[in-house]
Image: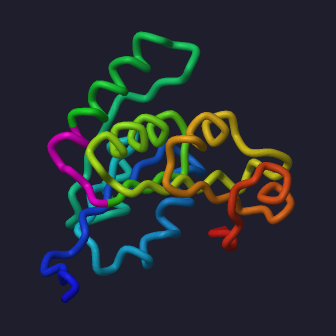
Amino acid sequence: MAHQRTNPPKVLAIASGGGHWVQLMRLRPAFADAKMTFVTVRPTYQSDVPGEDFRVIPDATRWNKFKLLLMAAKIFWIVATVRPDVVVSTGAAPGYFAIRFGRWFGARTCWLDSIANAEELSLSGQQIRPHASIVLTQWPHVAESSGVEFAGSVL
């Protein structure tokens, strides 16, 4: 007899700011039955997810190693305490760390590369590819050339 889940799945949805966050928000209907934790770099984005668990992390890029380390530490703490069943990200650096740490804790993970990456998979997407359960692009020709999956676009 199959085990039936009685609790909704815990989903950690994480993205940096700007277009990455906008694309993550477009995915919200897919998580209607989940217990959500949203993670991003801008406190003002909390108004986009009223009533949901919302966490803010430091903003950083690969050009600032110290801030990147702080970001990674905060994301590790969030993943370790939330213990999500699923980690979903639209990029960039925050999603990379969350997917890596999520896998350590047994989460299924999904990277959705930004629609802005119309010619090739993003650097973060290329780096996370071996670690994510699934990597999606929003462009069919990018899927074909990079060996990831295409299932439509969110914008």
Q: Position of residue 49 (x, y in %)?
A: 32, 63
Front residue (pair 35, 146):
146
Give the farthest residue toward the bottom: 1
Is 37 displayed left or right of 124 in the figure?
A: left
The residue under the point 57% across, 41% down is: 130
Front residue (pair 4, 80):
4
- Res 3 → quadrant: bottom left
Query: What's the magenta bit mostly, secondary-structure-wise?
Result: helix
Q: Position of residue 51 (x, y in %)?
A: 20, 66
The residue under the point 86% across, 60% down is: 141
Image quarter hosting the N terminus: bottom left
- Res 70 → quadrant: top left
Q: Position of residue 101 (x, y in %)?
A: 34, 38
Q: Examine the rendered structure and indicate whether residue 91 appears above or below residue 51.
A: above
Tag count: 0
Is 97 displayed left or right of 53 in the figure?
A: right
Q: Is residue 147 magenta?
A: no
Is 148 displayed left or right of 101 in the figure?
A: right
Image quarter hosting the C terminus: bottom right
Front residue (pair 63, 87):
87
Q: What colour scheme was applied to this rendering of the protein?
A: rainbow
The residue under the point 25% across, 70% down is: 9
Q: Position of residue 76 (x, y in %)?
A: 27, 33
Q: Which residue range is magenta in the image?
A: 78-85
